[in-house]
Image (cartoon, helix red, strand yellow):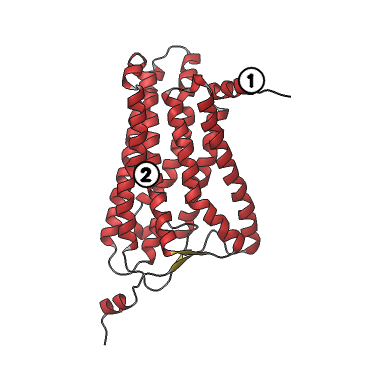
Amino acid sequence: MHTKTENIQDNSTAPSNFILLGLSNEPHLQSIFFSSFLGIYIIILSGNLAIILLTLADPTLHIPMYFFLRNLSFLEICYTSVTVPKMLDNLYSRNKSISFMCCALQTYFSVFLGGSECFLLATMAYDRYIAICKPLYYPVLMGEMTYRNSAVASWLSGIFMSFIITSMVFTLPFCGSNVINHFFCDVPPLLKLACGETFMTEIAVFVVAIIYVTLPFILILMSYSGIIVAILKISSSAGRKKTFSTCSSHLIVVTLFFGSSSITYLKPNSIYSPNTDKYLSLFYTLISPILNPVIYSLRNKEVKCAFMRIWERKPFH
């Protein structure tokens, strides 16, 4: 008679593939989702690429704020490209399988890019804090080497931790069902499929979430606390409005991204709700990336002026 542990060991061979349930199994809804998400993905790619090209083309935008914005736009393109193409393929072909290796790679890059975005958004908040609260020291505190190194550090911040988390998750024994109730290979639904002892992995995921979500969010709160104090000291309402407009776009992006990701990764695994979480994941995988170019272009006077200057220089034959 085999013990429970022996049964787990016997049945815990790594599956050759997983099945991604996606958002819905209804055929008519899948067609609607495919058309909608394809349109959103095209807007994300074209909108963020336009931000990158525009901020590179206009010399007046060659300042740290728009250097960070270029990095954010490129990161959004990479981040959505990790999850959306496979989701579109699953919706179009109705083949919902993903290989074990592709699933591991998708998890690694989603954690890596998500963590990098958290720190990049914190760096952008600090940049706005220095520009508004310490304008005289801005050229010194945010010199070229400083802001370039800050961007590099943000990009590199997620590499090591993402490797650890992905290794811990995909070396767990998977027995029984290989069906992931999600539209991409995310850590929480994968942990639900694992059998055996997952406590240490859950603790590691929670610690990484604290580092990559809570710590940058605290830095952002500190930066914006200083910004709000500085804005309140401005005597004229027009001056307060103008100063706040330079960081309001960033604040909207931060609220959407951190609000949805913190609920997903910081709540206890015992109250994990797959249907709620996968719809909530749409906010940081699709909604935030598509709003990034819209918010920064429509609410930013410098970006709109730069676009008009480039448009007027365009030769028409």
At label 2, the amino acid type is Gly
Q: Nearer the viewer, residue 17 or 254?
A: 17
Question: Nearer the observer, disc 1 or disc 2?
Answer: 1
Locate residue 152: give its quadrant: top left
**Residue 313 numbered tag:** 1
Determine the residue positioned at 33% across, 46% down. 159
N-term-proximal mark, 1 vs 2: 2
301 left or right of 274?
right
Determine the residue positioned at 54% across, 34% down. 293
**Residue 115 numbered tag:** 2
Quadrant occupied by the N terminus: bottom left
Quadrant occupied by the C terminus: top right
Determine the residue positioned at 40% across, 35% down. 121
| Gap between marks 1 and 2 measured at Cα | 39 Å
Identify whether 11 is placed above or below 68: below
**Does any portion of residue 221 appear in the rendered image?**
no
Label 2: element kind: helix
In this figure, what is the number of numbered marks?
2
